[in-house]
Image (cartoon, rainbow, N blue to C red):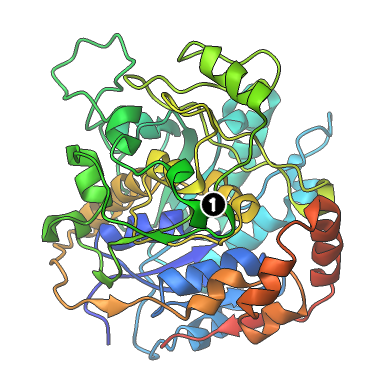
Amino acid sequence: MSKRPIGIDLFSGAGGLSLGFEQAGFDVRAAVEIDPIHAAVHKFNFPNCAVLARSVVGLSAVEIREAANLAPEEKVHVVFGGPPCQGFSMIGHRVFDDPRNRLVLEFVRLVADLDADYFVFENVKGLTVGRHKGFLQELVAAFQKVGYRVELPWQVLDAANYGVPQHRERLILFGARKGLDLPSYPLPVCRPADSLDSSNLPVGPTVADAIGDLPDADGFTELSDGDSVRTTSYGKLSAYASEMRASDPASWRFGIPRVWDAQLLTSSWRTEHTPISRQRFAQTAPGTTEPISRFYKLDAEGLSNTLRAGTDGARGAFTSPRPIHFEKDRCVTVREMARLHGFPDWFRLHWTKWHGARQIGNAVPPPLGRAIAGQVVKAMQHVPDPVRDAISLGDPSLLFVQMSAAAQKFGVDAPSMRRDRKSGAKKRSQAETEAARLQSFTFPSE
């Protein structure tokens, strides 16, 4: 039985919030994610967490508890997640009447059915603007109806104020079962490097702090046909990079240490740019947008622009552009994106650039998640202890899962993935259409 408070992650993606909550001292026992690519990567990085690769619609609290192998007396302390919210254009109608917002009500239902002490709801800043506020008012009322108080007024938090070298704003709602202390919003721990703020807070990490030590992917021929290479050619580590490299025990915070290969540079598949594109990238001033591609060029002493996911296969498989490196005439790699987002180097992503970048763009930056989770820990009056015993990461085949029937078997043959690596968006879209017809599956806890 876990001595750590238990958390459940709904709409988990690859696990940005899961990692933040783990680092704050929670035992994340189950995650629900309908996208099998995200679900498989989550299972690789959190091998002791049950992952249900299915929709929350029709999913019961009993099924979640059984998958997580929770004993009858074990309490779910917090449920967290960010359900998709799309139905905001129905002028004159209750936004909860829009069927596209059903997933939000499913979130409310599962929080109540799991009898969680606390919940954390995260979503886009846009919900706080204009008529969308009506959605939030209805959401608060829905939680109150099932026995929860909500910390008001709600707040939008910028990850750059919590140690992330990227501006990324997220709406956060804290809730507590009536009779329990509500968490308060976390205070900033740093001021962004590009801020004019003159407070006494320390300056947060810069782009150079985040990725300046990483070996240049263009220097490895192996990265023309794969996402990883063995190397020790890292540069000088900033304090931020040192934590991303898990250079000392404190880097794990209150999370569970992983056994990992620190000499394996991952998620670094090269992007082949034309000479003309490289020339344009080189001529673009840092902190500005290249006029033809519309790619943003990073400023070494500034912060990254918000990294986005693009769209899934059902909507054309469009990948949002990765920014241009601050000193290389190329776009950043997926690993460099991960650093800019606060994912440590041991955290693996899907081996393709498209899925790997999509997983980052969909995720809450782990340091922001940790700051949020820390407030729940504080409200619980729980004092977490560091974990000393390391665990192994999951089955590597999970990193090669395709959006196809192979996903049900928890992996595919890596050589066949190499043969298909240039199949393009059209084939990916067809595969995702096929995946929509699959039965759901569960990666059980170990």
Above or below, 405 against 125 in this view is below
For residue 217, which quarter of the picture? top left
- Between 86 and 417, the one lying in front of the other is 417
Query: Where's the N terminus, which quadrant?
Result: bottom left
- Between 2 and 128, the one lying in front of the other is 2
Q: Residue at x 44, y 62 (%)?
A: 348
Residue bearing mark 1:
269
Kind of residue sitting beneath label 1? Trp
From the top left corner, tell me how far across and down residue 371 is, in percent: 29, 45
For residue 434, which quarter of the picture? bottom right
From the top left corner, tell me how far across and down residue 231 is, in percent: 32, 57
From the top left corner, tell me how far across and down residue 293 is, in percent: 69, 22
Above or below, 413 against 188 in this view is below
- Between 133 and 1, the one lying in front of the other is 1
* Mark 1 nearby-residue class (10 Å; few <14, some 14–19, many ≥20): many
From the top left corner, tell me how far across and down residue 19 is, in percent: 37, 59
Horizontally, is 167 left or right of 314 in the view?
A: left
Q: Is residue 56 visible?
A: no
Query: Where's the C terminus, which quadrant?
Result: bottom left
- Between 159 and 390, the one lying in front of the other is 390
Q: Is residue 299 visible?
A: yes
Q: Secondary structure at mark 1?
A: loop
Horizontally, is 163 left or right of 123 in the view?
A: left
Q: Residue at x 28, y 79 (%)?
A: 391
